[in-house]
Image (cartoon, rainbow, N blue to C red):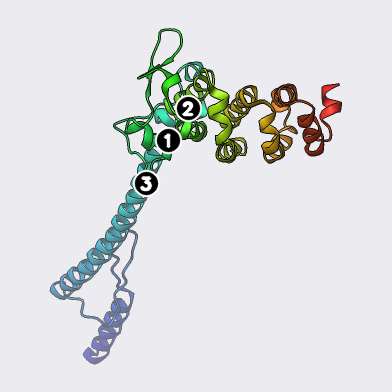
């Protein structure tokens, strides 16, 4: 017998089962959203819920995009910074001056270092450079096609050795052209004038410390100029140099251990012995015990 109450109960039960089985999946970047069966299932409410969920997904997407943009911008800045530093280092290593220092050219020997009048100069120039720039040395450098020479403003025989000879000896420690050539050649030419021994012997107490400063210099070219100047002075003053010789032989004995200077120092000692006489030989033996064995 048909009972409307039983049929209504069966409909309500089927409807509740159907509601429990209903679900909705929304595809947004592989995200599935399942609706609770007890939520309202009418179309307007469901559409409003999807819109709210869609705005949340958009915010999440924007947040992820912002993080990616920040990482991209930071990596771009880092790459740009590394590129700038690399370009600076390449410019510094590829500059002509650095390349010239690493790979010196053969023409550098023919063209010595010269003072750049337009470059930055030291605030306190050397004594010789200051005197030379003010015209205190009565000679100038003349550039020749083959070699350089000095041109004296007046005959060197008429010049006083005090203090010109000492000033030229101080210039032996210079390392830049034209100071190197002017001091070396001026010292040599001044000692060749007539009456040079009488003018040079009284200056030995002041001249020897200046020559010693050149002999103990760390630059090899300065040492060679000082050694040549010592031999030139020995030729002029002779045995008068023996009283001061012991102050100079200590620096010579130190350089004698260097194979590069063994031959020129030995030759200089022989000339000192030749012009200084027997008295110079005893002084050389006391300071350089191996001198006799080297000569033999």
Query: At 40% across and 31% down in the image, what residue appears?
Result: 95
Q: Residues within 10 Å of mark 1 (few under 14, many from 20)?
A: many
Q: Position of residue 89 (x, y in %)?
A: 42, 39
Number of numbered discs visible in the structure rendering: 3
Q: Tell me the quarter of the picture where residue 152 sits.
A: top left
Query: Visible in this render: residue 286?
Result: yes
Circle 1 SS class: helix
The one nearer the camera, 143 or 40, is: 143
Q: Residues within 10 Å of mark 3 (few under 14, many from 20)?
A: few
Q: Position of residue 191 (x, y in %)?
A: 54, 22
Q: Earlier in the sequence, mark 2 or mark 3?
A: 3
Query: At 31% across and 69% down in the image, what residue appears?
Result: 33
Find residue 128 and name its label.
1
The one nearer the camera, 159 or 12, is: 159
The one nearer the camera, 168 or 234, is: 234
Residue pointed to by mark 2: 183
Q: In which quadrant is the C terminus drawn?
A: top right
Residue pointed to by mark 3: 79
Q: Residues within 10 Å of mark 2 (few under 14, many from 20)?
A: many
Query: Visible in this render: residue 1?
Result: no
Q: In which quadrant is the N terminus drawn?
A: bottom left
Q: Tell me the quarter of the picture where residue 232 sits.
A: top right
In the rendered structure, are the residues bearing label 2 and label 3 in contact, judged by CB atoms less than 8 Å apart?
Answer: no
In the rendered structure, are the residues bearing label 1 and label 2 in contact, judged by CB atoms less than 8 Å apart?
Answer: yes
């Amino acid at each position: 017998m048909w009972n409307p109450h039983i049929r209504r109960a069966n409909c309500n039960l089927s409807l509740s089962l159907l509601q429990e089985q209903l679900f909705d999946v929304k595809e947004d970047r592989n995200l599935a959203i399942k609706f609770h069966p007890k939520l309202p299932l009418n179309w307007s409410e469901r559409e409003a819920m999807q819109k709210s969920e869609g705005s949340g997904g958009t915010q999440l997407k924007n947040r992820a995009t912002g993080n990616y943009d920040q990482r991209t911008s930071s990596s771009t800045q880092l790459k740009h910074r590394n590129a700038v530093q690399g370009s600076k280092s390449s410019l510094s290593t590829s500059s002509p001056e650095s390349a010239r220092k690493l790979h010196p050219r053969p023409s550098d020997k023919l063209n010595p270092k010269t003072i750049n009048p337009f470059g930055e100069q030291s605030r306190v120039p050397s004594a010789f450079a200051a005197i030379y720039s003010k015209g205190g040395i009565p000679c100038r450098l003349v550039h020749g096609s083959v070699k350089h020479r000095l041109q004296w403003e007046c005959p060197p025989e008429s010049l006083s050795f005090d203090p010109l000879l000492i000033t030229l000896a101080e210039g032996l420690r210079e390392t830049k052209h034209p100071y190197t050539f002017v001091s070396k050649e001026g010292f040599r030419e001044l000692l060749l004038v007539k009456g040079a021994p009488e003018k040079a012997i009284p200056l030995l107490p002041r001249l020897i410390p200046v020559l010693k400063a050149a002999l103990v210099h760390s630059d090899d070219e300065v040492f060679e100029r000082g050694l040549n100047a010592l031999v030139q002075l020995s030729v002029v003053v002779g045995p008068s140099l023996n009283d001061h010789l012991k102050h100079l032989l200590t620096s010579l004995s130190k350089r004698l251990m260097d194979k590069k200077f063994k031959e020129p120092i030995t030759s200089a000692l022989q000339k000192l012995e030749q012009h200084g006489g027997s008295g110079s030989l005893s002084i050389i033996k006391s300071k350089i015990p191996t001198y006799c064995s080297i000569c033999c």
